[in-house]
Amino acid sequence: MNDFKNIKSLTLDELKTWLKSVGEKPFRAEQVQNWLFCNQVQSVEEMVNISPSLQAKLSEAFQIHSFKEISRDESVDGTIKWLFQTHDNHYIETVMIPKSKRFSVCVSTQIGCAMKCTFCRTAKMGFIRNLEAGEILEEIIRVNWYLKEAKILNNEGNQAEVTNIIFMGMGEPLNNLENVHRTCCTLHNQKLFNMGRKRMTISTSGIVPKIKELVDRNTPCCLAVSLNSTSNEQRSAVMPVNRIWPIEALLEATDEYTRRTDNHVTFEFVLIKGLTCTKEAAKELIRICAPRRCKVNAIALNDGDDPNLQAPSAEEIDRFLEIVRAADVQITMRNPRGRDILAACGQLAYKQGTVESC
Ligand code: SAH
């Protein structure tokens, strides 16, 4: 289906232009977007203040929703993972992580990934294509549908809905910046999702020029960077992106981000036994973080396919955290969520030919 058009990918102006081209009044664009993003309707027929003739034109030109839900798995910790089939028969995963008041959704931004990080399962899929803004938004809308259907309440007893978005699923968001930017703008728009900047976090493996572009575009989001290692030699071995933009270049970009946005950067740090979870690495991490306005999110390695990369023991992790905390660097240990359903960081992958996650 090469002529497939996702209506949710269009900006308000683009939708107005289309409406004019089919002889309709441009103000209908606001109404249509309201149905799509506020009411999150499942079909065009539900847009009751839109004339049947415009409904027909919309149905002919666009598909309102494009994913087919293939499976939905729930973890013992409440995390839920969806496997969606795209209109062109590819597969992506979306994860919802409930935590008292918060319902965070970890969205995929690409089908597969080109970054080749050795510890990450998505890398094994290779890169297939970018997701459109409408598709990324659909991941969030589908989670909202589920929360409503399952009558899930937040801890205040109200109908739960998605509160936070983390761009940490499959793919490298900054390699799909145009669509990710559009997504963030729609989410941030007060008339649409009305999500504050602080509720959206883009995580990157470290595409330096794109970090600068993110600042130039003033994309409404926070920035997380997968630092994962403190030495160039080690980082290049596990994250090939480091061979192009080494740690110094990355830090220059994150410093510029902090300076220009007045917002801190979160460094993500995967703890790998004997590699990144050592006394030396802790000291290096202090050298990098102590002089900067930043936070560190540490996470123990989740099982991958590489037998050389192991998770550290609880004692090794404690020792690491103790050293870093003693230097007043703000470090939080992230609890792995959804490991039992392969929904944790670095575990999202889909093997062509099966309808199961690998
Ligand atoms: N490409 C982006 C977003 C996807 S990865 C990025 O690199 O940031 C999201 C996070 O999961 C990254 O911080 C990454 O370092 C982490 N991650 C990947 N594989 C992991 C694994 N096996 N165990 C723990 N964290 C992992």
Image: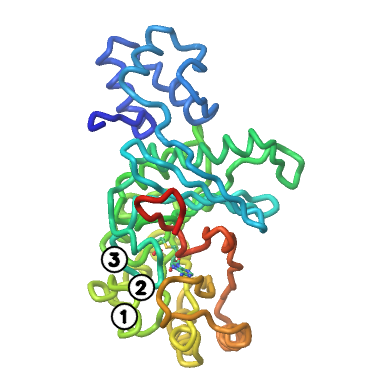
Ligand 1 closer than 8 Å to label 3 CB: no
Q: What is the three-letter code of the residue carrying label 1?
A: Ala
Q: Residues within 10 Å of mark 3 (few under 14, many from 20)?
A: many
Q: Position of residue 168 (x, y in %)?
A: 45, 57
Quadrant containing the C terminus in the rendered view: bottom left
Q: Give the label, 2 or 3, closer to the camera.
A: 2
Mark 3 or mark 1: name the one nearer the start of the chain. 3
| Image spot of residue 123 (x, y percent) | 34, 63
Q: Is residue 327 visible?
A: no
Judged from the image, the secondary structure of the residue bearing numbered disc 3 is helix
**Which residue was labeled with disc 3?**
208
- Which residue lies at the image location 33% right of the left edge and 56% below the top edge? 174
| Disc 3 to disc 1: CB gap under 8 Å | no
For this orientation, the residue located farthest to the right is 157
Q: CA distance from mark 1 to mark 2?
A: 8 Å
* Amino acid type shown at disc 3: Val
Is tag 2's residue or tag 3's residue first in the polypeptide sequence? 2
- Element type where label 2 sits in the image: loop
User: 10 Å neighbourhood of mark 1: few (<14), some, or many (≥20)?
Assistant: some
Task: Tell me: is circle 2 under 8 Å from ligand 1.
Answer: no
Identify residue for label 2: 118
Contact flag, marks 1 and 2 (Cβ < 8 Å): yes
- Asked where in the image residue 226 lies, by quadrant, the reply is bottom left
Relative height, residue 323 to residue 289 (above, below): below
Which residue occupies 57% across, 88% down? 323
**Vertical placement of residue 59 versus 156, above or below:** above
Hey, which quadrant is residue 72 in on the image? Answer: top right
Q: Nearer the viewer, residue 175 or 312?
A: 312
Residue 128, can we see it? yes
Spatial separation of the CA atoms under disc 3 and disc 1: 18 Å
Q: Which residue is mark 1?
A: 237
Q: Amino acid at mark 2?
A: Thr
